[in-house]
Amino acid sequence: MSYMRQIPVREKNIVLIGFMGVGKTTIGQLVAKKLYRDFIDIDVEIEKNEKMLIKDIFSKYGEKEFRRIERETISDICQAKRCKVVSLGGGAFQQEEVRNVCLENCIVLFLDLSWDRWKERLDLIIESRPVLHNRTLEEMQELFNARQDAYSKHNSRVQTDNLVAEEVADYIVETLKLGWDIYQPQKD
């Protein structure tokens, strides 16, 4: 591990993780606006760079190649750009390299939504999530449960079950600002 200059906490990227469909993009856009930061959705960034939709990358090249592209994109953004709000795809944090680069360089917030609440959103999200295609509800729950271990590695957890996106964003912003005040370097 290289020892470079420590990134001031106020300048760190804010990374949102959680299962697909929990609201990372919507909440991330709101947080970015409230903090006057740019917002980056990793999936949108990949589509822009590859000039291809995520579902087409999956069907043409497979999940393994998509995960490689995703890992490189996240690594580049989290190490190079500062003061952004970044939304990761639901499966990205499964990769150890992604977890390490995010936790080392960013503030990682886990947007936690219960299985029962997530199921209520299924009709809205299934079409745009290739990893869910041709899976039974039981298989989706297995995937949901399997990813919880990776999501448990974060800087802060935000329970979103009974909150609308605006409330979650406000909570995140208030919490970050409080943390920034606490960790503000003291002037001599």
Image (cartoon, rainbow, N blue to C red):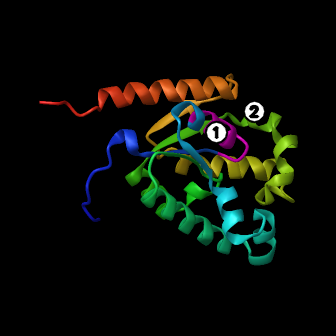
Q: Is residue 170 above or below residue 125?
A: above
- Quarter of the image that includes the N terminus: bottom left
- In percent of width and height, residue 14 lies at 49, 43
Q: Looking at this view, is 50 or 106 the one in front?
A: 50
Residue at 66% x, 64% y is 46
Give me the residue at 39% from left, 44% from top: 11
Q: Given the image, on which type of amino acid does mark 2 rest?
A: Asp
Residue 45: x and y in percent read 65, 60
Amino acid type assigned to the residue bearing label 1 in the image: Gln
Q: Circle 2 — which element?
A: helix
Task: State if disc 2 and disc 1 touch (CB < 8 Å).
Answer: no
The boundaries of the magenta stretch are: 19-31
**Number of the front mark, 1 or 2:** 1
Camera sees residue 136: no
Magenta segment includes 185: no
Instruction: Classify residue 21 as left or right of residue 133.
Output: left
Residue on which disc 1 sits: 29
Query: Does 24 appear in magenta?
Result: yes
Residue highlighted by disc 2: 116
Q: Quadrant of the C terminus?
A: top left
Toward which corner of the image does residue 24 lie, by quadrant? top right
